[in-house]
């Protein structure tokens, strides 16, 4: 198994406030890493450091391709909050196609192969009937599908998702998780969520971020590990084999 990203003892601070401290983590090829943790614990900050939107105050992040260090990787990113202007006159297909801008040569049209990728991605997202619609006419869930399509159309090495189900409509939510399983066959995925029960059936490994980082190989969490990470007794309440919610232990 080859490394894709090696994070070595990084720290990130905003002014005098330390948000991340001594964070080390390895992301592997075709990994599906779930990042969990409390609000304000540094999950999104860690993503921004990986994306090089923030410069760590210490430590190092190294990218690998075919087992060798490289200056950068192709990364698809779906942020928790999108800042796309819904009133900007751009269509669904144009937003998805914008994920290929870095491959496009100047003002040339997209190649036949690129157009095929755009079409296949739109079909995968279930938005083929909306390709000409302005994004301002979409629901929040529909727009999230469009932005996910933009994130994956370039076939990145890594797909990073920050709370991807935040704006996804219920119709697409179940399809989203199946879709991520299929996407994971071709690329590594990093998925951030505050809801451990939702992501447990999906992920291969788990990291809990709360200023520091606790890594758990596999998705079979023990009560001892949960108590160590969260510093309080926690129970997983499941439906069949699928955890549903994470609750503190309480007295009746």
Image (cartoon, rainbow, N blue to C red):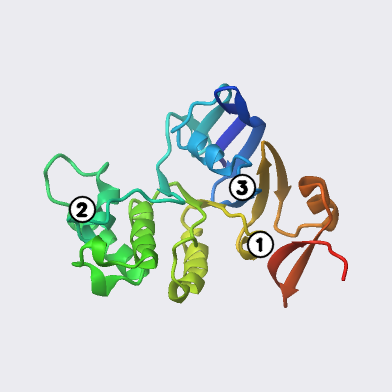
Q: Which one is in front in this view, the residue at disc 3 or the one at disc 1?
A: 3
Q: Earlier in the sequence, mark 3 or mark 1?
A: 3
Task: Tell me which residue sits at (76%, 57%) in the image.
Answer: 221
Q: Is residue 87 visible?
A: yes
Which SS class for mark 1?
loop
Which SS class for mark 2?
loop
Residue 2 location in percent, x, y? 57, 42
Residue identified by numbered label 2 = 88
Residue 250, above or below 109: below
Q: CA distance from mark 2 to mark 1?
A: 37 Å
Which of the 4 quarters of the picture holds residue 103?
top left
Which SS class for mark 3?
loop
Residue identified by numbered label 3 = 39
Residue 125 location in percent, x, y? 36, 67
Residue 47 location in percent, x, y? 52, 41
Q: Are marks 3 and 1 in contact (CB under 8 Å)?
A: no
Q: Which one is in front in this view, the residue at disc 2 or the one at disc 1?
A: 2
Q: Quadrant of the C terminus?
A: bottom right
Q: CA distance from mark 3 to mark 2?
A: 31 Å
Q: Is residue 10 visible?
A: no
Task: Tell me which residue sits at (36%, 68%) in the image.
Answer: 124
Mark 2: few, some, or many residues within 10 Å (few <14, many ≥20)? few
The answer to whether residue 61 is left or right of residue 137 is right
Residue 16, above or below 51: above
Residue identified by numbered label 1 = 200
Mark 3: few, some, or many residues within 10 Å (few <14, many ≥20)? few
Q: Earlier in the sequence, mark 2 or mark 1?
A: 2
Residue 245, above or below 57: below
Residue 126, above or below 186: below
């Amino acid at each position: 198994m080859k490394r894709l990203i090696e994070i070595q003892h990084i720290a990130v601070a905003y002014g005098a406030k330390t948000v991340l401290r001594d964070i080390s983590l390895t992301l592997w090829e075709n990994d599906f890493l779930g990042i969990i943790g409390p609000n304000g614990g540094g999950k999104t900050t860690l993503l921004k450091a990986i994306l090089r939107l923030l410069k760590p105050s210490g430590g190092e992040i190294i990218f690998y391709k075919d087992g060798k260090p490289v200056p950068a990787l192709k990364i698809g990113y779906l942020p928790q909050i999108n800042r796309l202007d819904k009133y900007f006159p751009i269509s669904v297909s144009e937003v998805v196609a914008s994920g290929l801008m870095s491959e496009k040569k100047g003002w040339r049209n997209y190649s036949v192969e690129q157009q095929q990728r755009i079409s296949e991605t739109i079909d995968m997202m279930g938005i083929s009937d909306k390709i000409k619609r302005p994004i301002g006419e979409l629901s929040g869930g529909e727009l999230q599908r469009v932005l996910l399509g933009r994130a994956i159309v370039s076939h990145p090495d890594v797909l990073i998702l920050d709370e991807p189900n935040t704006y996804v409509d219920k119709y697409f939510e179940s399809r989203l998780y199946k879709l991520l399983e299929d996407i994971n066959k071709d690329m590594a995925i990093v998925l951030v969520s505050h809801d451990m029960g939702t992501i447990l059936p999906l992920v291969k490994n788990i990291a809990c971020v709360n200023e520091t980082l606790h890594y758990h190989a596999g998705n079979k969490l023990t009560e001892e590990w949960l108590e160590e990470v969260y510093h309080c007794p926690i129970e997983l309440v499941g439906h069949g084999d699928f955890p549903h919610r994470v609750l503190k232990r309480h007295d009746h």
